[in-house]
Image (cartoon, grey):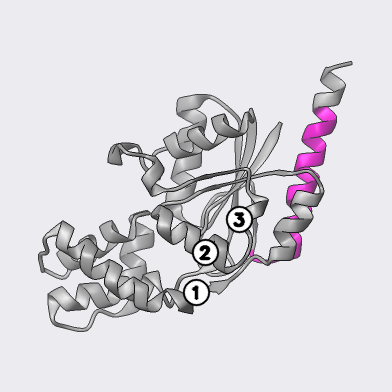
Amino acid sequence: MRAVIFDVDGVIVDVRESYHLAIKETAEFYLKEEVPLEDIKRIKFSKGINNDWDATYEVIKEFGGEADYDELVRVFTEIYERLKYREKQILSREFFKSLKDAGVTLGIVTGRPKVDLEFVLDRFGIGEFFNCTVDEDDVVDKNLRKPHPFPLHLCMETLGAEDGIYVGDNRADLEMVTYYRKIYGKPMKFVHFKKVVDLDLPADFSTGNEEELRNYLLREVFQSREAEQVSLL
């Protein structure tokens, strides 16, 4: 069975006015100076930092500041709670419904804390479409969190899938898929969905268009099913 697994930030929801601004405001709280948003994106995406708390800490360090990590998390969380309603849905409810109606097995692997993931799924009414979700809180060992491939492996094992497609938007997503192939030795295609962040990343398929993405995923899943049926003959 081939499963399709999604990242959340930058793929399902646009977080430029929530998480990205929370990084900026938290960094500025500690640095007492303005931090250009472009510098934040450069640091986060060029270094492939998946966790936004880690990205904030790295921004503060790069600008010559320092912060207690636990306190930083508290400050960041307070700011994000104020900004989270600015998040906009990217992939529509109809998109996920059409995949589900076609019998596609869907999952999520994200670096979001569980409470933030549930907020998005509930707010946009899409939680019912996913057979499995793996968030930051599901992986206790911080060393095994995304971009380590363990969360992807956990999702695939839970789904009972041997083959997969991961839809992501940044270098951390690509790294997770690459290491998943190497460590677990199973097939996993990487789709670069670049509607929000148009990075130059190698991918099996790349698009910023919802309809193109839907058509590609349905084609790949149906081809996989046909191959499985042939192998059983």
The amino acid type, in three-letter code, at marker 2 is Val
- N-terminal of the pair, mark 1 or mark 3, is 1
Classify 93 as above or below 171: below
- The quarter holding residue 106 reads top right
- The quarter holding residue 228 reads top right
Classify 206 as above or below 60: above
Local SS, label 1: loop
Local SS, label 3: helix
Q: Quadrant of the C terminus?
A: top right
Q: Looking at this view, is 55 or 39 the one in front?
A: 55
Residues shaded magenta: 208-227
Q: Tell me residue 147's x, y (percent).
A: 40, 44
Q: Residue furthest top?
A: 233
Local SS, label 2: helix
Quote the CA–CA distance across marks 2 and 3. 9 Å
Q: Which residue is mark 3?
A: 127
Q: Tell me residue 48's x, y (percent).
A: 37, 54
Majority secondary structure of magenta residues:
helix
Q: Which mark is residue 87?
A: 1
Quote the CA–CA distance across marks 2 and 1. 9 Å
Q: Is residue 39 magenta?
A: no
Q: Tell me residue 161's x, y (percent).
A: 64, 30
Q: Looking at this view, is 176 or 118 the one in front?
A: 118
Q: Residue at x 77, y 34 (%)?
A: 224
Q: Which residue is mark 2?
A: 120
- N-terminal of the pair, mark 2 or mark 3, is 2
Q: Are marks 2 and 1 in contact (CB under 8 Å)?
A: yes
Left or right: where does residue 16 sit relative to residue 227? left
Quote the CA–CA distance across marks 1 and 3. 16 Å
